[in-house]
Image (spheres, rainbow, N blue to C red):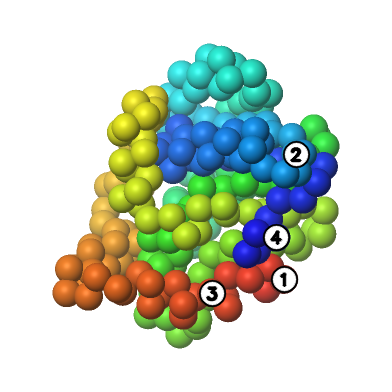
Amino acid sequence: MDFDMIGKGDRIMLGLSGGKDSLTLLHLLLHFQRHAPIDFELGVVTIDPQADGFDPSALIPYVKSMGLKHHYRQEPILELAQTHMKKNSYCAFCARMKRGLMYDTLRKHDYNVLALAQHLDDLAESFLMSAFHQGQLNTMKAHYLIDAGDLRVIRPMVYVRERQILDFAANGALPVIEESCPACFSIPTQRAYMKSMLDREERANPQIFKSLLSAMRPLMKKGMPET
């Protein structure tokens, strides 16, 4: 409600990777669909990057058991990166490829909203990375219209801590598929460093995420461009 994310008649497609975050959001959206005072439709899209050691196909029967439409797309992203990636990192290339494929899937099947599962810890890490490395005050948006003007992106878990998601996934025995991309985990990342730094700071200041949320809230609002 704070960010006016879901409206009557919206056709929402969840980007489901199989990680704890997107699986938790799947269950939250199903709960909202049953209990919210508005009607909306829900579908699921999974992008399989065909990376060695990562197979999200187990999601197919899981999503089917919930009675949801599941759009499962395979794309050799790692292979494409070796020939098409320029100066950007593999992770950035992969993220753009996945996002483009998800947008394409929404358009082909007449959905108007893409739901993504980033949480408060992700936003805080992005905020610090932007400030430290780009000299800008930016973070992920809670709700925005993409540049093409035909699709909206929402992040319903922007107030949720990662530890809450870990507890939910464990207590619900969710079928989490661990990420195992060799390109992502071969070297330390800026995000991993920020996560470690925030963990250390939170031990000294338990209110740090509350303060960061207050600082980021104006940057999260609909209408501002996505970073």
The label number, if any, that marks residue 217 in the structure image: 3
Q: Which residue is mark 4?
A: 4
Report the Cα–Cα distance between label 2 and label 4: 14 Å
Q: Is residue 52 left or right of residue 221?
A: left
Secondary structure at badge 3 equals helix
Mark 3 against mark 1, which lies toward the viewer?
3
Amino acid beneath label 1: Gly
Report the Cα–Cα distance between label 1 and label 2: 22 Å
Point out the image quarter for the C terminus. Answer: bottom right
Identify the residue shown where x is 57% and y is 54%.
155
Label 3 crowd bin: few (<14), some (14–19), many (20+), radius 10 Å: few
- Would you place residue 214 above or below residue 49 in this image? below
Q: Is residue 31 left or right of residue 50?
A: right
Q: Which residue is mark 1?
A: 223
Determine contact: label 1, label 2, CB under 8 Å: no
Label 4 crowd bin: few (<14), some (14–19), many (20+), radius 10 Å: few
- Would you place residue 173 above or below residue 196 in this image? above
Report the Cα–Cα distance between label 3 and label 4: 14 Å
Report the Cα–Cα distance between label 3 and label 2: 26 Å
Q: Which residue is mark 2?
A: 40
Label 1 crowd bin: few (<14), some (14–19), many (20+), radius 10 Å: few
Q: Is residue 101 left or right of residue 23?
A: right
Amino acid beneath label 4: Asp
- State the image coordinates of residue 142 (x, y, percent, origin top left): 59, 62
Report the Cα–Cα distance between label 4 and label 1: 12 Å
Amino acid beneath label 3: Arg
Label 2 crowd bin: few (<14), some (14–19), many (20+), radius 10 Å: some
Chain-order first, disc 4 or disc 1: 4
Does residue 206 appear in the picture of this structure?
yes
- State the image coordinates of residue 179 (x, y, percent, origin top left): 36, 37
Amino acid beneath label 2: Phe
